Image (cartoon, rainbow, N blue to C red):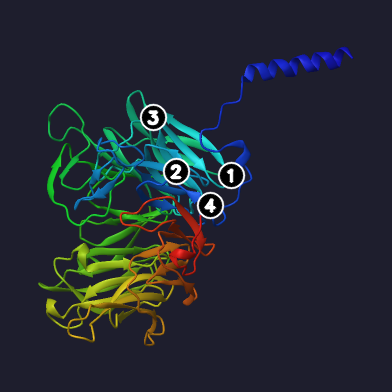
Amino acid sequence: MRLHLVLFAVMLSACAAQGPASRPTFFMPHAAAVTPSTPSEDYGTAHPFLLLDSAPDGRWILACQAREDTNGDGRIETVFGYHGNVVGDALHPYLFLEPGAGIRIDEVLAVAPTGRFLVLVRDTTLWLLDVEAREEKVLASEVIPDTTSPQPPLRASFSRDGLRLLYLRPEAGRPVAVVRDLLQGTERVLDAGRGLIGQVLLDPSGQWAVFDVVEDTNSDGKESWPQEDTTLASATCRGPVSSSSHFGWEGDTPVRRYRRLEGGPLLQGDDILQPMGEGMLRRAPDRSIILEHVDGRRETWVPSSCNATLVFADAVHEQVVVVCETQPELGPVELHGARVHQPLGWRVSLPFSDRYVGLSGSDGRLLSLLASSEPGPSKAVDTVIDLKQRTVRVVPFGDLVASLGAHALLQERVKPVEPDGRWGERLWLWNVETGFPPNVLSESPDSGLLRAGDTVLIMGKRIDLRTGKVLGEASEALALDIQGRVLRPIEPSSPLSGPVRWEPALKTHESQRTR
């Protein structure tokens, strides 16, 4: 009995030392076992509503709402100007982890590609949320949100698989770069060299950290991250942008540095092109492009005779797409790698510009490129490079709007039949690998492209891009999820007002909807 009393006293002492359990900020205890919401549950309030993002499985929603009469005109109303600026009452961002009024936040810094993790700022605290495990973690304190910049620097970044996070944390008044293993819960500080870190990116492979750093390049006695002089509205709760103007930058000029997460030197220089898996693509003094392996071994991929400009790095197939600047006007497009050196038979106008490159598939297989098969820039047409088959096909018509594997969606403008009629839109499914003529999927006035996993919603059709099959129809959607649901407003209006609700992706007449 005496031993039992001693053990009981020890247990009481331990509990007292731990103190009372902290109150959860985002995940309430009663919601620990909640699954993704079912239809007929409302998100938000009956006020102006601007959707920012949603989870692939619908577990969370990020949106902005105006819920107060901030301009004192006696009503709550918001409209947007040409530059995405808010006219009327102020919008504020909210996180919805379950139906209801949501949680007001200050800023979202990053969302994992899988949708499982979120990094956000609330009340000067930097939070990491694990939506699947319903856990929250404080990453840093005394964090000032950036709610005024039209293009805020990236201060958090996930790897493509969503298992690693790189973020900035203030220490002694200056930011440091921290990499975190999201499954193990471990983290460490990475040395980015001297200067002020303004932006961090994690290479999609999760093997390289990228730092954008400023020193006092304008000799004003301080290190200042550049600020853009533009008419573009703040990125926080920015509405649709019709136009904007850019008038330059103020502040110091950043330099880019790279560090392999598993160890190695800090890299900086004009010869560095970009990471390629564990290696780094670099330009040699003779203009050849080499791959520098993790062990320091260098392998020439693109010969100096090409005088290449890098267009696209295809890590999956260990090759690069380049334009060889060997002629005055048109440069040949070629594929190069350790085991491939292949001209593609097409050319682009020189000097090469990013405007020639269009959409790349979500899996990196298809790459669209404006190119010419005959001399003369006016002969340029839209083409698609199949990086797996190493072939090029001309887009038969329309614009490439989405792709996965060999399947591509083409959207075409259709002339009206009647002289005074309106132009229409037609959607085609095209198998780039076979090259067979595309199939018509839709002719609809609906616009916009929504995506969740391998499924897209476009022009009223919900399509599985991996199989190329139409799964059904949907309309009036704000978002799509992998469960076959769409997010819709309860009472469609212009401008949009909440609340919103997940519903089955079926066409539903407004009068049939009930609250």
* Element marked by disc 1: loop
Among the two numbered marks 1 and 3 on one chain, the one whose residue lies closer to the N terminus:
3
Q: Circle 1 sits on which residue?
A: 133
Q: Are the residues tagged 1 and 3 within 8 Å (C-beta)?
A: no
Q: Circle 2 sits on which residue?
A: 95
Q: Is residue 270 left or right of residue 9?
A: left
Front position in the image: 474 or 309: 474
Among the two numbered marks 1 and 4 on one chain, the one whose residue lies closer to the N terminus:
4
Whole-percent x, y for residue 186 in the image: 53, 37
Residue 465 showing in the rendered view: no
Q: Circle 4 sits on which residue?
A: 41
Q: Circle 3 sits on which residue?
A: 124
* Element marked by disc 3: loop
Among the two numbered marks 4 and 3 on one chain, the one whose residue lies closer to the N terminus:
4
The amino acid at mark 1 is Ala
Mark 1, other Cα within 10 Å: few <14 / some 14–19 / many ≥20: few
* Picture layout, residue 9 above or below residue 241: above
Whole-percent x, y for residue 315 in the image: 40, 62
* Picture layout, residue 388 above or below residue 205: below
The amino acid at mark 3 is Thr
